[in-house]
Amino acid sequence: GNSVTQMEGPVTLSEEAFLTINCTYTATGYPSLFWYVQYPGEGLQLLLKATKADDKGSNKGFEATYRKETTSFHLEKGSVQVSDSAVYFCARLTGNQFYFGTGTSLTVIP
Amino acid sequence: DVKVTQSSRYLVKRTGEKVFLECVQDMDHENMFWYRQDPGLGLRLIYFSYDVKMKEKGDIPEGYSVSREKKERFSLILESASTNQTSMYLCASSSSGLGKNIQYFGAGTRLSVL
Protein backbone atom coordinates (compact mmCIF):
# COMPACT_ATOMS: atom_id res chain seq x y z
CA GLY A 1 0.00 0.00 0.00
CA ASN A 2 0.87 3.65 0.09
CA SER A 3 1.68 5.20 3.42
CA VAL A 4 3.96 7.48 5.35
CA THR A 5 5.26 6.58 8.78
CA GLN A 6 6.94 9.13 10.95
CA MET A 7 8.44 9.17 14.37
CA GLU A 8 6.04 9.35 17.26
CA GLY A 9 6.15 12.45 19.39
CA PRO A 10 6.14 14.54 21.29
CA VAL A 11 9.78 15.52 21.11
CA THR A 12 11.26 17.98 23.60
CA LEU A 13 14.72 19.43 23.05
CA SER A 14 16.85 22.14 24.56
CA GLU A 15 17.80 25.10 22.40
CA GLU A 16 20.80 24.39 20.12
CA ALA A 17 20.29 20.62 20.30
CA PHE A 18 20.42 18.42 17.19
CA LEU A 19 17.08 17.34 15.76
CA THR A 20 16.15 14.24 13.81
CA ILE A 21 12.59 13.29 12.95
CA ASN A 22 12.39 9.98 11.12
CA CYS A 23 10.11 9.40 8.16
CA THR A 24 9.75 6.33 5.97
CA TYR A 25 7.36 5.70 3.14
CA THR A 26 5.89 2.91 1.11
CA ALA A 27 4.79 3.64 -2.41
CA THR A 28 4.75 2.28 -5.88
CA GLY A 29 7.04 4.17 -8.17
CA TYR A 30 9.03 7.21 -7.12
CA PRO A 31 6.93 9.72 -5.25
CA SER A 32 7.92 13.29 -4.44
CA LEU A 33 8.54 13.76 -0.73
CA PHE A 34 7.81 16.75 1.48
CA TRP A 35 8.09 18.09 4.98
CA TYR A 36 5.38 20.47 6.11
CA VAL A 37 5.38 22.47 9.36
CA GLN A 38 2.39 23.67 11.36
CA TYR A 39 3.04 26.46 13.83
CA PRO A 40 0.55 26.89 16.70
CA GLY A 41 -2.80 28.17 15.50
CA GLU A 42 -1.86 28.05 11.83
CA GLY A 43 -2.30 25.85 8.80
CA LEU A 44 0.46 23.75 7.27
CA GLN A 45 3.33 25.39 5.40
CA LEU A 46 5.76 23.71 3.07
CA LEU A 47 9.17 23.43 4.73
CA LEU A 48 11.13 21.53 2.08
CA LYS A 49 10.78 18.95 -0.64
CA ALA A 50 12.69 16.48 -2.80
CA THR A 51 11.46 15.05 -6.06
CA LYS A 52 13.92 12.27 -6.86
CA ALA A 53 16.36 9.89 -5.24
CA ASP A 54 19.41 11.49 -3.57
CA ASP A 55 17.87 14.96 -3.78
CA LYS A 56 18.37 17.03 -0.65
CA GLY A 57 15.73 19.54 0.33
CA SER A 58 16.73 22.35 2.65
CA ASN A 59 15.17 25.44 4.20
CA LYS A 60 15.60 27.48 7.41
CA GLY A 61 18.47 25.23 8.53
CA PHE A 62 16.41 22.06 8.09
CA GLU A 63 17.50 19.33 5.68
CA ALA A 64 16.17 16.02 4.42
CA THR A 65 17.63 13.63 1.85
CA TYR A 66 15.53 11.35 -0.35
CA ARG A 67 16.95 7.85 0.26
CA LYS A 68 15.46 5.38 -2.16
CA GLU A 69 17.42 2.42 -0.78
CA THR A 70 15.95 2.88 2.70
CA THR A 71 12.69 4.55 1.55
CA SER A 72 13.35 7.33 4.02
CA PHE A 73 13.25 11.12 4.19
CA HIS A 74 14.44 12.01 7.69
CA LEU A 75 14.30 15.63 8.78
CA GLU A 76 17.38 17.09 10.49
CA LYS A 77 18.51 20.37 11.94
CA GLY A 78 21.85 20.97 13.56
CA SER A 79 20.80 23.53 16.16
CA VAL A 80 17.14 24.05 16.98
CA GLN A 81 15.64 27.29 18.26
CA VAL A 82 12.60 28.00 20.41
CA SER A 83 10.88 29.33 17.29
CA ASP A 84 11.11 25.84 15.71
CA SER A 85 8.48 24.58 18.15
CA ALA A 86 5.73 23.23 15.90
CA VAL A 87 4.22 20.06 14.49
CA TYR A 88 6.10 18.53 11.55
CA PHE A 89 4.44 16.40 8.91
CA CYS A 90 6.14 14.15 6.41
CA ALA A 91 4.22 13.64 3.18
CA ARG A 92 4.51 11.96 -0.18
CA LEU A 93 2.85 12.88 -3.43
CA THR A 94 1.61 10.36 -5.91
CA GLY A 95 -0.29 11.80 -8.86
CA ASN A 96 -2.14 14.77 -7.45
CA GLN A 97 -2.81 13.24 -4.07
CA PHE A 98 -0.82 13.78 -0.90
CA TYR A 99 -0.44 11.20 1.86
CA PHE A 100 0.58 12.63 5.22
CA GLY A 101 2.19 11.10 8.26
CA THR A 102 0.56 11.56 11.65
CA GLY A 103 2.76 14.50 12.61
CA THR A 104 5.51 14.92 15.20
CA SER A 105 5.18 17.64 17.80
CA LEU A 106 8.45 19.42 18.66
CA THR A 107 8.92 21.66 21.67
CA VAL A 108 12.20 23.51 22.08
CA ILE A 109 12.92 24.87 25.54
CA PRO A 110 15.35 27.73 26.26
CA ASP B 1 1.90 34.92 -2.18
CA VAL B 2 -0.65 32.18 -2.55
CA LYS B 3 -3.55 32.70 -0.27
CA VAL B 4 -6.03 30.08 0.86
CA THR B 5 -8.72 31.59 3.03
CA GLN B 6 -11.11 29.64 5.21
CA SER B 7 -14.17 31.65 6.19
CA SER B 8 -14.14 30.82 9.91
CA ARG B 9 -11.39 30.03 12.41
CA TYR B 10 -13.80 28.67 15.01
CA LEU B 11 -17.32 27.32 14.74
CA VAL B 12 -19.67 25.87 17.32
CA LYS B 13 -22.68 23.97 16.04
CA ARG B 14 -25.33 21.68 17.45
CA THR B 15 -25.93 18.06 16.57
CA GLY B 16 -28.14 17.76 13.51
CA GLU B 17 -27.37 21.20 12.12
CA LYS B 18 -26.29 21.66 8.52
CA VAL B 19 -22.82 23.17 8.44
CA PHE B 20 -20.99 24.88 5.60
CA LEU B 21 -17.23 25.37 5.64
CA GLU B 22 -16.00 27.70 2.92
CA CYS B 23 -12.59 27.89 1.30
CA VAL B 24 -11.33 30.36 -1.29
CA GLN B 25 -7.97 30.44 -3.08
CA ASP B 26 -6.61 33.28 -5.16
CA MET B 27 -4.03 31.54 -7.36
CA ASP B 28 -6.25 30.01 -10.03
CA HIS B 29 -5.37 26.51 -8.80
CA GLU B 30 -7.14 23.60 -10.43
CA ASN B 31 -7.02 21.29 -7.42
CA MET B 32 -8.64 21.82 -4.05
CA PHE B 33 -8.78 19.55 -1.02
CA TRP B 34 -10.54 19.18 2.31
CA TYR B 35 -8.82 17.37 5.20
CA ARG B 36 -9.64 16.84 8.81
CA GLN B 37 -6.88 16.81 11.40
CA ASP B 38 -7.22 14.83 14.61
CA PRO B 39 -4.63 14.08 17.31
CA GLY B 40 -2.72 10.90 16.58
CA LEU B 41 -4.33 10.50 13.17
CA GLY B 42 -2.65 13.30 11.24
CA LEU B 43 -4.43 14.62 8.17
CA ARG B 44 -7.10 12.54 6.51
CA LEU B 45 -8.48 13.43 3.12
CA ILE B 46 -12.25 13.92 2.99
CA TYR B 47 -12.85 15.08 -0.59
CA PHE B 48 -10.93 16.70 -3.39
CA SER B 49 -11.70 18.38 -6.66
CA TYR B 50 -9.68 18.66 -9.86
CA ASP B 51 -11.89 21.13 -11.61
CA VAL B 52 -15.10 23.07 -11.37
CA LYS B 53 -18.10 20.82 -10.69
CA MET B 54 -15.82 17.81 -10.27
CA LYS B 55 -15.34 15.99 -7.00
CA GLU B 56 -13.69 12.82 -5.81
CA LYS B 57 -14.03 10.97 -2.53
CA GLY B 58 -11.01 10.82 -0.29
CA ASP B 59 -10.38 8.38 2.52
CA ILE B 60 -13.21 9.44 4.85
CA PRO B 61 -16.10 10.96 2.85
CA GLU B 62 -18.92 9.55 4.96
CA GLY B 63 -21.09 12.27 6.50
CA TYR B 64 -19.69 14.97 4.21
CA SER B 65 -20.37 16.43 0.79
CA VAL B 66 -18.68 19.15 -1.23
CA SER B 67 -19.49 21.77 -3.81
CA ARG B 68 -17.25 23.41 -6.40
CA GLU B 69 -19.32 25.80 -8.48
CA LYS B 70 -16.45 28.22 -9.10
CA LYS B 71 -12.77 27.49 -9.57
CA GLU B 72 -11.67 29.55 -6.59
CA ARG B 73 -14.19 28.20 -4.07
CA PHE B 74 -14.55 24.77 -2.53
CA SER B 75 -17.19 24.19 0.12
CA LEU B 76 -17.41 21.36 2.60
CA ILE B 77 -20.92 20.50 3.81
CA LEU B 78 -21.93 18.52 6.86
CA GLU B 79 -25.54 17.62 6.10
CA SER B 80 -26.35 16.72 9.71
CA ALA B 81 -23.50 17.46 12.08
CA SER B 82 -22.59 14.86 14.67
CA THR B 83 -20.29 15.03 17.68
CA ASN B 84 -17.72 12.77 16.00
CA GLN B 85 -17.24 15.48 13.39
CA THR B 86 -15.71 17.76 15.99
CA SER B 87 -12.28 18.38 14.50
CA MET B 88 -9.89 20.79 12.81
CA TYR B 89 -10.72 21.12 9.12
CA LEU B 90 -8.02 22.18 6.67
CA CYS B 91 -8.50 23.30 3.10
CA ALA B 92 -5.68 23.17 0.56
CA SER B 93 -5.13 23.97 -3.09
CA SER B 94 -2.52 23.11 -5.71
CA SER B 95 -1.76 23.62 -9.34
CA SER B 96 -1.77 20.74 -11.82
CA GLY B 97 1.26 22.07 -13.63
CA LEU B 98 4.32 19.84 -13.81
CA GLY B 99 6.50 20.51 -10.80
CA LYS B 100 3.94 22.90 -9.35
CA ASN B 101 1.95 20.50 -7.22
CA ILE B 102 2.82 21.86 -3.81
CA GLN B 103 -0.24 22.08 -1.61
CA TYR B 104 -1.01 25.42 0.02
CA PHE B 105 -3.10 25.34 3.16
CA GLY B 106 -5.56 27.62 4.84
CA ALA B 107 -5.30 28.41 8.54
CA GLY B 108 -7.96 25.84 9.43
CA THR B 109 -11.43 25.87 10.94
CA ARG B 110 -11.85 24.35 14.36
CA LEU B 111 -15.37 22.95 14.50
CA SER B 112 -17.05 21.87 17.70
CA VAL B 113 -20.32 19.96 17.47
CA LEU B 114 -22.25 19.91 20.74
Image (cartoon, grey):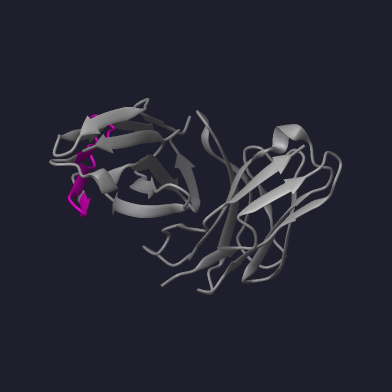
- B30 to the left or right of B78: left
Identity of the residue drawn at 83% across and 50% down: B18
The residue most toward the right is B16
Identity of the residue drawn at 53% across and 65% down: B4
Q: Nearer the viewer, residue B41 or B94?
A: B41
Q: Position of residue B9 (x, y in %)?
A: 60, 55
Q: Position of residue B112 (x, y in %)?
A: 69, 41
Q: Nearer the viewer, residue A102 or A107?
A: A107
* In the image, residue A71 lies in the stretch drawn in magenta: yes
Measured along the vertical axis of the image, is residue B60 above or below residue A12?
below
Q: Which residues are magenta?
A: A57-76
Q: Position of residue A31 (x, y in %)?
A: 37, 45
Identity of the residue drawn at 43% across and 35% down: A101
Q: Position of residue B60 (x, y in %)?
A: 66, 37
Q: Quadrant of residue A23?
A: top left
* In the image, residue A61 lies in the stretch drawn in magenta: yes
Is there any visible trace of residue A86 in the rendered image? yes
Measured along the vertical axis of the image, is residue B74 above or below residue A48?
below
Identity of the residue drawn at 49% across and 69% down: B3
